[in-house]
Image (spheres, grey):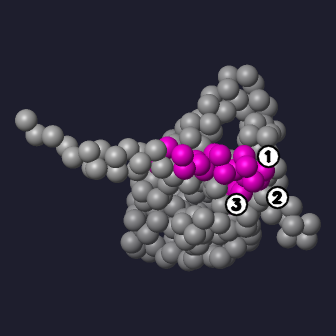
Amino acid sequence: MFRIPVGVIAALSISVCAQAQQPSRLDEIVSRGTLRVGMTGDYRPFTHLDETAQKFSGFDVDMAEALGRALGVRVAFVKTGWPQLTQDFEADKFDVAMGGISITLDRQKRGLFSAPVMREGKTPIARCADKDRYSTLADIDRPGTRVIVNPGGTNERFARAHVKAAEIRVYGDNRTIFDEIAKGDADVMMTDASETRYQQKLHPGVLCAVHPDQPFDFAEKAYWLQRDVALKAFVDQWLHIAMNDGSFARIYAAWFQ
């Protein structure tokens, strides 16, 4: 009969005990008294940064504050951007990324996602006078069509995967990108349905969301967490309670209805 040497058993026991005693990310957040939340600040209605006041507002800002209260800690917002979001996440500049973050397998390899908070997909937004011209990807992907995208996120990846004949213009300021369509310097943008609905409300009669209830693809939004099972379990349970006690619905209604 094979016997494991006593020394090996002792070493394994010490290793297991040491791992068990290591604090989780959740423990660290509670101990420091601060939840660090990464946000781009340029994706209404999820997140918007007032550069003058240096203050964030939006749906996921309110959700982050609610999460902080549930944890019993203050929330510190960390400015990031779509092109450097993954780099900042891997550099541990924040505990969680919020602000309209789409679930992707690439991001999943680097961290954990909470339970989804929204299901949608990419859909076009164009000038209302032209909206019938851009109902399908084939309609959009034609020579002469000017597709505009913000850099570094899922919008740019989607456009580059599906647009070959039309022109793709990368525009660096997501806060003013829709004004480029409104004034005629671009024709169409493909982005998340929630954003097209919101921008339609901000530009009534000028910009129109094109079939936001029937997006081109499937996507979900969630909160991107540093890889810690205890933290994910807490956030998921907080979301479960919020979606059943009416608090999630109240925050959602303030920004999307």
Q: Which of 200 and 61 is in front in this view?
A: 61
Tell whether 169 sits left or right of 107: right
Please name whichever residue, 138 or 37, is drawn nearer the observer in this view of the structure: 37
* Label 3 Cα crowd, 10 Å radius (few <14 / some 14-19 / many 20+): many
Residue 136's x, y, as percent?
Answer: 45, 54
Q: What stretch is highlighted in magenta?
A: 19-38
Amino acid type of the residue tagged 1 in the rendering: Val
**Which badge, 3 or 1, comes first in the chain's sequence?**
3
SS at badge 3: strand
Q: From the viewer's perspective, is 151 left or right of 247? A: left
The crowd level at tag 2 (other Cα within 10 Å; few <14, some 14-19, many 20+) is many
Graded by Cα atoms within 10 Å as few (under 14), some (14 to 19) or many (20 or more), the crowding at tag 1 reads some
Quarter of the image where one finds residue 147: bottom right
Seen in the image, is 188 located left or right of residue 45?
A: left
**Quadrant of the rendering where the C terminus is positioned:** top right
Is label 2 in contact with label 3 (beta carbons under 8 Å)? yes
For label 1, the residue is 73
Q: Quadrant of the N terminus?
A: top left
Residue shown at 63%/54% (left/top)?
96
Q: From the image, tell me which residue sits under label 2.
A: 56
Residue 125 counted in the magenta span: no
Per the image, the residue denoted by label 3 is 39
Q: Which of marks 3 and 1 is in front?
A: 1
